[in-house]
Amino acid sequence: MSEVAKIVQLLKSEAIEKQIAGAIVLGELRAKGPGVVEGLAEVLGSGVPLLQVHALDALARVGAKKALPAIFPLLSTSADDVRRAATRAIASVGDDVVPIIKQKMTTATPDERRALDAALAELGGKDAFSALIKGLASSDPEDAKAAALAVRNQVKGADGHKRRSYLAETEKFLDAQKKKKGGSPGAIAAAIKILGYLEDEKTAPLLLAYANDEKQDPSVRQEAIIAFRFALQGDKPSAKVIDALVKAAESSDRTLAQTALHTLGSLKVSEDTAKRLDKVALHPDFERARFVLDLLGRMGGHEAARVLTKVLVTTSDRRYAEAAAAGITGKEDAVPALAKALLETTNPDRAWVIRNVLRPTAKKISSAVRKQILEAALDRLADGERGWEALLDVARDADPDSVAEGLRALAQKLRRGANKEERARSVYQILCKSDRATDEDRYAYAALELARSNRDTRPASRAGDESLRLLGLLLRSGFDVARALKKDRGFELEHLYYVGFHFSELDHPLGEELLEEVVKKGGRAKVAKMAKNKLALSDASL
């Protein structure tokens, strides 16, 4: 007895382990000889999945043609591993099995049909693919879809010649379905899915025709739109393709719209695409709009920034504004559009939204526009109008030195004007909150606060006096407050007495110096007598 015959005998053993071992060895040896195929075919009826899988794999190596009658029934088994192994074994027979599969297709159950389609896909080749594609016409939608999915792996490994052959067969099938009234939408959708798997940009015109055809079943249009993701993955889509996708994104069919949006998101689109997304960015269906706003944010570029800015400044819906802001914040491309929008808006709330988005990139604003923003802020501030805050914040982030100079000049101008002390005080207050303020600025602010003080010397009143607090800060910074107050023509002796009284209470030398100045210049005036008395009390307490 030959060695091969001895191994074949293992297939008849009562021990499953020996049968499995025999099947594995016969497959590895690619054994030929009497009883090999017959023995392997016989164990297929064992009902043991592991043994069946190894026997089928062995048949795929030694030659499965004679065992086909025993293999085909396993295509409908519930064991996935066995079904896949049977598919491989049938495909191993080659083109000779195609006529047999076509014949079995006519009486196959849905499960068997899926397995037969998988076998054709596994087999590959023109005849097998032709049989599979033609079989789509008589398949139900789910079977047709499964057949298309089975083709995908085969197409991936196909060379250029095979791909062209597959493309020709698929186009031929679609043409036949077009001429045939009442063609199956499921079959057409499956064929279009296969077109996408071919990853050939030449299919774009045909896909475009189906995507635009509103008479087609939604499933067909949806598959055409999905197919663009594969067909155009290496190329930028044409304007016609973009228009078709945008049109679909606006469709009343929400599923079709979402498919179109996801396809847009997967393609290498140009900046010009942003123009076409303008409408969808404000679509009533917020989920669609949000997807587009996110897409525009990822795209970048001036046109995308323009659309995002438009949404930001026109919408009254907070959700849209927040989504647009998220896509545009920190993007240098967006700076010109945002700066322009900030200058043009008259709505303080909207200006504040723009301000929040623009501040991180404010330094990228051009010098000319910076100047415009600062001038607009100062004009509104000078006139007492609303809306200067957002402009000034952005201008300060862009150029803090220029803002400080502008505020200083405005405050000085207002201070010189008639009845504008209160506005001047407000401007100095803003200036003194920045790190660019000087001691002279702080003194000017303190002086304006002192001018409007009620000069009530009671402790509780003095404790809340802003002018005294500011003068105290200046003293601590080394500023010569006494000299400044003495030279300031805007103050009467009563002002000097009030400040002198306060700091005398604090035992600060400034108090005594100012009170002595009041005594010196007050003559016989009441305030001079008050200062003299306060000095006497201070001396007495020492």
Image: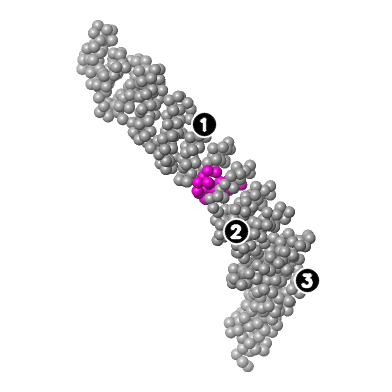
Task: Please name the residue that numbered disc 2 is placed on.
Answer: 229
* Element at label 2: helix
Q: Disc 2 versus disc 1: distance between alpha carbons?
A: 44 Å
Task: Say whether residue 156 is left or right of residue 451.
Answer: right
Mark 2 Cα shell of 10 Å, populated few (<14), some (14-19), many (≥20): many
User: Looking at the image, is mark 3 or mark 2 earlier in the sequence?
Assistant: 3
Task: Say whether residue 338 is left or right of residue 533.
Answer: right
User: Looking at the image, is mark 2 or mark 1 earlier in the sequence?
Assistant: 2
Quarter the C terminus occupies? top left
Q: Is residue 404 above or below residue 79?
A: above
Residue 78 lies in what quarter of the image?
Answer: bottom right
Residue 177 lies in what quarter of the image?
Answer: bottom right
* Element at label 1: loop
Mark 1 Cα shell of 10 Å, populated few (<14), some (14-19), many (≥20): few
Q: Disc 3 versus disc 2: distance between alpha carbons?
A: 36 Å
Task: Please name the residue that numbered disc 1 is placed on.
Answer: 346
Image spot of residue 100 (x, y percent): 73, 77
Residue 91 lies in what quarter of the image?
Answer: bottom right
Q: Is residue 253 above or below residue 122?
A: above
2 and 1 marks in contact (CB < 8 Å): no
Disc number lying in front (3 or 2) = 2
* Element at label 3: loop
Q: Total label count? A: 3
Q: Is residue 347 visible to us here? A: yes
Residue shown at the point (47%, 38%) measured from the top left: 339
Task: Please name the residue that numbered disc 3 is placed on.
Answer: 107
Magenta range is 287-307
Colouring chosen for the image of the structure: one colour
Residue shown at the point (48%, 30%) measured from the top left: 387
